[in-house]
Image: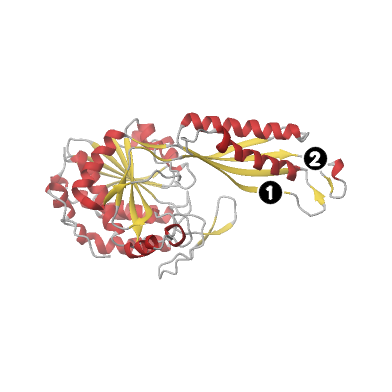
């Protein structure tokens, strides 16, 4: 893709600050390759956090470390004015990388369960970290061009949904100046150089549930003596599919996936329990509550119908909040992006993925917006679109082959953070 000029559609203070972007491009690209090659799982981001803190200090930025475990915060002060929080997440995933890149990860580590697993930045959080470091550096070098305070927040453990809440619980509010607005972005499987905004619900709420149902074990040749938990689990799976098709309005979006069933140990042994794990995605709190209630109702009823000897057990875990962009904040960022990015600004589609970013502004009582940036080579994406094979040929987040192109992805993400922040700091 041809290099995009940072001054084509930029004017005023935005342009004055971003003219220094070529000066930081080399270290951003080098740091990105380093982070991509050395990913760390949730709550294990010690090396990443150390590199972040080191780079912030090199730029003369005040640094706070250890909030929420491995969280890092940089504070840039430029006199009186609004306080803008910019957030990037740092953690990676237990995925074996298959990109073939020269800087591909070969890391393996021990996860929270004690198992050895591969590790990969399969969601682009390394991009997020480097973009925010670049934006913080540019803003710190040009405090004479803006007024206010920037809080650059590097968050751990987004992938497990408790990193944002962990920072809040560990005294985030008391550690930083009173925030006026919170902003965040995510790299997506769309053409690099593109930026997208969206009003209202932009990412779904997510809930994972572990359900244990109980039967009565017996020899496989004597099913009359058993309550078969495999059959019980199968009936539950079938019946749960009717929630979306028959209990949710067609105008509401719900995704209900049963991702795992575990039961039994041998072909001729009927076990005494089965474990189902499911994932729910919703965009409305009342719909979320109704579906969770329906799941419990159906499971209890099927257990009664099978004469289960024990009540089922439910464990709700890995819950992510709904991400709902504030209209006024989103419009303000959209207008700033329109002036800067021009035709590269698009509407961001509503996503069924989930985030815990909103836990931070919700706890701080401030409005927020969350936008997307593209990370796929433009020509690769165009070829896939022309052949009607975008969903087949373009790797998505969490895929072992997901690898954003370094440029113009880093430039675009850095510019977006600076331009969005200046929509308040230039006021």
Tell me where residue 423 sits by quadrant. top left
Read off the residue under disc 1.
262
Q: Quadrant of residue 234?
A: top right
Crowd band around label 1 with a 10 angstrom C-alpha radius: few (<14), some (14–19), many (20+) = some
- Considering depth in this image, is 217 or 365 the residue closer to the camera? 217
Element at badge 1?
A: strand
At a point 22% along the width and 35% down the height, the residue shown is 82
Residue 170 place in picture, x, y as percent? 42, 37
- Could you say whether the residue bearing mark 2 is in a helix, strand or loop? loop
Image height check: is 291 above or below 339?
Answer: above
Q: Residue at x 39, y 53 (%)?
A: 125
- On-image quarter of the N terminus: bottom left
Viewer-proximal residue among 7 and 102: 7
Q: Which-is-in-front pick, marks 2 and 1?
A: 2
Q: Is residue 163 left or right of residue 347?
A: right
- Confirm whether residue 137 shows in the render: no
Q: Nearer the viewer, residue 266 or 1?
A: 1
Nearest the viewer among 298 and 404 is: 298
Whether residue 240 is visible: yes
Locate residue 206, reporting x and y percent. 50, 40
Mark 2, residue position? 227
Where 215 sits versus 53, above or below?
A: above
Q: How is the image coloured?
A: secondary structure
Q: Position of residue 337 (x, y in %)?
A: 23, 46
Sort mark 2 into few (<14), some (14-19) or many (20+) by Cα contacts within 10 Å: many
């Amino acid at each position: 893709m041809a290099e995009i000029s940072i001054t084509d559609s930029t004017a005023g203070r935005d342009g004055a600050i971003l003219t220094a972007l070529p000066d930081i491009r080399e270290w951003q690209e080098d740091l990105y390759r380093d982070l991509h090659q050395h990913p760390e799982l949730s709550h294990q981001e010690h090396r990443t956090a150390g590199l972040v803190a080191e780079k912030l200090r090199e730029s003369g930025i005040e640094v706070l470390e250890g909030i929420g475990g491995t969280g890092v915060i940089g504070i840039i002060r430029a006199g009186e004015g609004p306080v803008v929080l910019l957030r990037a997440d740092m953690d990676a995933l237990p995925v074996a990388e298959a990109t073939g890149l020269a800087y591909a990860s070969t890391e393996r580590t021990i996860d929270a369960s004690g198992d050895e697993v591969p590790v990969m930045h399969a969601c682009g959080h390394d991009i997020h970290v480097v973009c925010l470091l670049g934006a913080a550096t540019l803003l710190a070098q040009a405090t004479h061009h803006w007024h206010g305070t920037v809080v650059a927040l590097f968050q751990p453990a987004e992938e497990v949904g408790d990193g944002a809440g962990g920072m809040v619980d560990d005294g985030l509010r008391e550690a930083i100046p009173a925030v006026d607005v919170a902003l965040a972005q995510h790299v997506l499987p769309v053409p690099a150089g593109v930026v997208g905004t969206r009003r209202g619900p932009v990412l779904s709420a997510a809930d994972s549930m572990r359900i244990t149902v109980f039967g009565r074990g017996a020899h496989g040749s004597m099913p009359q003596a058993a309550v078969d938990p495999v059959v019980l689990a199968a009936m539950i799976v079938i019946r749960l599919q009717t929630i979306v098709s028959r209990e949710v309005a067609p105008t509401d979006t719900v995704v209900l996936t049963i991702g795992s069933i575990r039961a039994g140990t041998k072909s001729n042994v009927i076990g005494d329990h089965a474990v189902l794990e499911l994932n729910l995605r919703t965009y409305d709190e009342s719909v979320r509550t109704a579906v969770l209630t329906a799941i419990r109702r159906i499971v209890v009823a099927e257990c009664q119908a099978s004469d289960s000897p024990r009540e089922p057990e439910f464990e709700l875990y890995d819950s992510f909040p709904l991400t709902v962009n504030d209209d006024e904040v989103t419009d303000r960022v959209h207008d700033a992006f329109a002036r800067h990015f021009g035709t590269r600004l698009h509407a961001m589609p509503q996503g069924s993925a989930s985030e815990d970013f909103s836990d931070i502004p919700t706890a701080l009582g401030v409005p927020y917006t969350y936008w997307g940036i593209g990370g796929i080579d433009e020509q690769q994406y165009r070829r896939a679109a022309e052949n009607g094979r975008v969903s087949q040929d373009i790797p998505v987040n969490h895929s072992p082959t997901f690898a954003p192109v370094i440029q113009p992805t880093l430039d675009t993400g850095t510019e977006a953070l600076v331009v969005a922040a200046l929509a308040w700091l230039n006021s």
